[in-house]
Structures are given as C-alpha cells and as structure tokens.
Amino acid sequence: SQELEQSPQSLIVQEGKNLTINCTSSKTLYGLYWYKQKYGEGLIFLMMLQKGGEEKSHEKITAKLDEKKQQSSLHITASQPSHAGIYLCGADGGSQGNLIFGKGTKLSVKP
Amino acid sequence: GAGVSQSPSNKVTEKGKDVELRCDPISGHTALYWYRQSLGQGLEFLIYFQGNSAPDKSGLPSDRFSAERTGGSVSTLTIQRTQQEDSAVYLCASSPDLGYGYTFGSGTRLTVV
C-alpha cells in the first residue's frame, strides 16, 4: 500500500525565516494535496499538484511536485506566526477515491 | 451550508457506550469521507461515500464501526461498545467529485473513559 512520509516531523523557525517541508511517497503520485491544520479546526486546503514538475504558489507558500512524481515540497517564504500549524500532505489512494496522509509536520514560528 | 459541519465538537463517553457522530457536508458535494486522527498518528481513512454507490468501508477498523449517509447528504458515523482506543478526532470531508480538493469539517474529538 502507498505510504507518505513527511519531514521534518516538527520545525521551529524564527519569524521572517524561510522553511521547507517535504513529503515523499512510496509510489508514484497522481494527485498530491497540501493541507494546514490548526488545533481545534478542520483541515484547510492549500494546494493540489498533479503534473510532474508542477509548481503552485499562494501568497508566501509554494508547493512543487518533482518530475518523477514521488516527492513534493512545501516552501514558506518569510514565515509569519500565522503560518504556525500542522502541515499535512495527502495523496489519492487509488481507485477508492480516498486520500492517504502523511503524519504531518508541526510548524512553530517564533515572533 | 458554507462548509462541512460536524457535531458534536467534543464527546466524552464511558467505555462500552455507543456514540453517534454527525457530518453535514457542503451542499451538492457527492463525495463524503470519514477519517480518524489518533494522537501522534496521521489521518486514517475509515469510509467513503460517492453518490448513490455502495460505500467503501475498507477502512473501518472493526464491526463496531458503521456509517450511513441519508439522502446523499448528512452522514452519521456510529461506534458501538466504545473502547479506549477509539479515542481520537474524527474528521469528515466532502468533495464535489472524485479527485477534487476536499473540504474538511472541524472534527469531533471523542474521548472514551
């Protein structure tokens, strides 16, 4: 079965610093989703990537899917306290239509 | 509604009791999913409804778990004879169709004591 591994598991950065979170799949990715979760809230959809080499940006967050479609990275530029939370990558689980998820990366941003 | 609504937001129950968790998806979304997030674990797929098709129950951990989706809209996840290991946050998501961006509810935090 397909598995997603995220790294790092947790990350503490100073406000204003850049950071990168990685998501590696054990199989080819056909749809990769990035979500953000804050405590007590649901998951917030950030971006979806489908094509190898695809890159999408939203405000200060950029996500890429590598050419081989087995790894994705999420890059935050000039981090803010509002970026703090748990970032989860999810992938299409196949014909069932469900998503599988990595265990998440907990991001803390120190003011 | 504007988003996926789940209720209750928190539930504390005694071991052995039955619980029902409710999910009200975004109007018009044909796909509805239930996930479970245990402490320190990633999201675990439980069950998936798509339109009028038979649900995919492959993720349900035991026969104590069941789910229904009435009228293609509201879904109820039922856990019978709850156990302490059932304690987790149960998340519901809906999507317009297979493969589209999913919208998640805020979850129900279940604590079995």
Image (cartoon, rainbow, N blue to C red):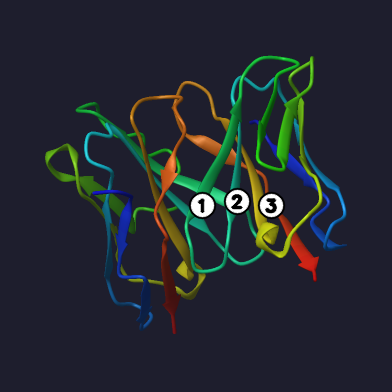
Q: As rendered, which of A39 and B81 lies closer to the eye?
A: A39
Label 2 sits on residue: A36
Which numbered mark, 3 or 1, is in the foreground of this view? Answer: 1
Tell me the subunit letter for badge 1: A
Label 1 sits on residue: A43
**Residue B5: % across, % down:** 30, 56
Of callouts 3 and 2, which one flags the residue occurring earlier in the amino acid sequence? 2
> Do callouts 3 and 1 point to residues on the same chain?
yes
Left or right: B73, with B44 as reference point: left
Is disc 1 in contact with disc 2, using a CB cutoff of under 8 Å?
yes
Left or right: A40, with B14 as reference point: right
Q: As rendered, which of B112 and A35 lies closer to the eye?
A: A35
Task: Categorize mark 3 by other alpha carbons within 10 Å: few (<14), some (14-19), many (20+).
Answer: many
Q: Amino acid at mark 1?
A: Leu
Q: As rendered, which of A72 and B54 lies closer to the eye?
A: A72
Label 3 sits on residue: A104
Q: Quadrant of residue A86?
A: bottom right
**Residue B34: % across, % down:** 39, 48
Q: Amino acid at mark 2?
A: Lys
Dot 2: element: strand
